[in-house]
Amino acid sequence: MPSFPTPSLAAPSSLATGASPDAPPPRRRAAAAFIFVTIVLDFMAMGVIIPVLPRLIQTLGGGGAGQVAQVFGVFTAVFALLQFLVQPIQGALSDRFGRRPIVLASNFGLGLDYLLMALAPTLSWLLLGRIIAGAAAGSLTAASAYVADVSTSNERAGGFGRIWAAASAGIVLGPLLGGALSGIDLRAPFWASAVLSLANAVYGLFVLPESLKPENRAPIQLGQLNPVGALLHLARRYRGLFSMTLVTFLGGLTWQGVNPLFVVYTTFRYGWKPLDISLLLAVLGGSNCVIQIWLIPVLVKWAGERWVTLVGIAAQIGALLLFGLAGNGAGFWLGVPLICLGNIAGPAWQALLSNRVGPSEQGRLSGALNGMFAIAGVLSPIAFTSLFALVAGTRTAQAWLGAPFFVASATAALSLALAAWTTRRGVAR
């Protein structure tokens, strides 16, 4: 299992009370570490339940595998729906009251939610816990705005890369922690996560300074407290922004559709065992951290956010095609280096978007983007898993099993064309 170093999200000298970029103040370094750990915990919140929630549902509600799968599907959809609804609200609140209270409230909310789920006596209480988790696990919005606050336009891609690296670490560590602790007790993962989240929140009370200056705070407008309203408000103010956000939505459709398929696809087509899948997750997680922490700043400085984004999406298209065409496990692995390289696209694209809006609207932009990504997470997995179920049941299954990856490559190609068009000279800076 790779290690995940805690990077520095240190502010530039102009925002660090006179310190040089090479030696940020200890308080700022502590704040950077706190932001990184918060994102790790947020994504662990989504991953820690994967190994244990179906078994806990069966324990509380009984029923066969089909019933458990249905209830698990409802829980997953409810979580994503709450993310879609709440992210813009958190973004607007962070633009009004600052990033610090939103990040800390998210940590405390997650900690209390874990306690509730650890103690839940019935399925109804467990569902309530998932509702609270969906509403509370949203510090990504305020944390992204925090990075934008303390970074210059040239440094944002690197800062967002560290955020994405933290998310990758959480995605890998969550299921591993849940699986390991479930051997002790089925509810042990929730107790451990509650302790971690609450301890992190208390630590943040002492080390996390506010990043949004009072003069950059914006009033709350009710019409902007939903993803559509927030996006339309920003699109009216900033030319080309709406088309750019569609690229984010297409990316959400692509990857939230194929991500749930990797385990069942490699198991069904190649006969992979849990050890093979764990190795894949370890390679992806470790390489993501390396690429997003160290490679992205270098590439952006050399080629700029636009070209880094376009090259990254092109690599993703190539990887998806290889995954769909691979007739054996060795062929599937050929696409892994490309998918790792493709991870340069997300942070660079987020930096392009962030650089187009003012400091008083970073939270709303982040909330709108995360909201769109969340609704893609409601729609896309159903469509892609249904397509896989359809082709897997045909007589010519081997010839068509890669169909979901071919569809995903087409969606990614559309996002590439739209990204190139909307950032052409004279439209995006």
Image (tube, helix red, strand yellow):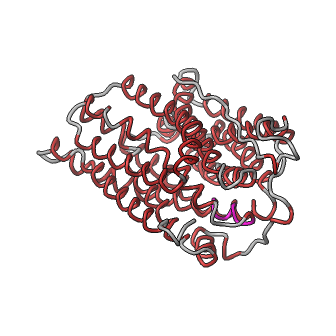
Q: Nearer the viewer, residue 174 or 294?
A: 294
Total marks placed: 0
Can you say which quadrant of the picture contains the C terminus?
Answer: bottom right
Q: Residue at x 72, y 32 (%)?
A: 195
Residue 394: x %, y % from top left: 15, 48
The residue lying toward the viewer, choosing from 291 and 321, is 291
Classify residue 90 as left or right of residue 121: right
**Image: magenta residue range:** 360-366
Position of residue 214 measured from the top left corner of the image (x, y, whole percent): 86, 62
Task: Assign the magenta stretch its main secondary structure.
Answer: helix
In the depicted structure, whether residue 4 falls above or below residue 16: above
Q: Residue furthest front?
A: 302
Q: Is residue 311 above or below residue 239?
A: above
**144 displayed left or right of 272:** right
149 in the magenta segment: no
Q: In the displayed image of the protein, which residue is found farthest to the left?
A: 395
**Which quarter of the picture shows residue 163?**
top right
Give the residue at x 87% y 39%. 206
Identity of the residue drawn at 26% across and 35% down: 268
Residue found 30% across the figure and 48% down from its top: 405
Q: Is residue 425 left or right of residue 203?
A: left
Q: Quadrant of residue 181?
A: top right
Q: Is residue 57 above or below residue 382?
A: above
**128 left or right of 276 in image:** right
Query: Residue 197 at x, y = what percent?
Result: 71, 37
Residue 363 covered by magenta stretch: yes
Q: Position of residue 295 (x, y in %)?
A: 54, 38
Q: Is residue 291 above or below residue 104?
A: above
